[in-house]
Image (cartoon, rainbow, N blue to C red):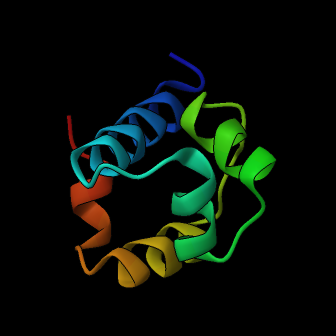
Amino acid sequence: MEGDLQKLLGRNLRAYRQARGLSQEDFAELLEVHRTYMGGIERGERNLTLKSVERIAEKLGVDAVTLLQS
């Protein structure tokens, strides 16, 4: 289905954020993005490039593939 990967990535990022006990705003600051942009990612509304996924994964210290797995 269209957008399923975006939603999966968003759910994984939300779970990662919540596991760390971070607010969406604090998580966005950690990733150096605006909080409203972070919200769009978590809701699966943002169509990220692979480069963006790699950059986010690097900042989190995880493999990019991990963020895309269910």
Image side of residue 18 versus residue 22, left or right: left
Q: Write down the quadrant of residue 52 in the picture.
A: bottom right
Image side of residue 40 versus residue 36, left or right: left
Measured from the top left, where is residue 65 in percent x and y? 26, 62
* Rendered position, 19 above or below 57: above
Determine the residue positioned at 31% across, 54% down.
67
Determine the residue positioned at 56% across, 73% down.
31
Nearer the observer, 67 or 5? 67
Measured from the top left, where is residue 2 in percent x and y? 59, 21
Nearer the observer, 8 or 60? 60
Determine the residue positioned at 61% across, 62% down.
28
* Rendered position, 14 above or below 67: above
Nearer the observer, 35 or 21? 21
* Rendered position, 57 above or below 18: below
Image side of residue 54 versus residue 61, left or right: right
Looking at the rendered structure, the number of numbered marks drawn on it comes to: 0
Determine the residue positioned at 71% across, 31% down.
45
Image quarter (top left, top right, bottom left or bottom right) of the C terminus: top left
* Rendered position, 8 above or below 38: above
Image side of residue 50 versus residue 57, left or right: right
Measured from the top left, where is residue 66 in percent x and y? 21, 58
Nearer the observer, 23 or 60? 23
Q: Residue furthest top?
A: 1
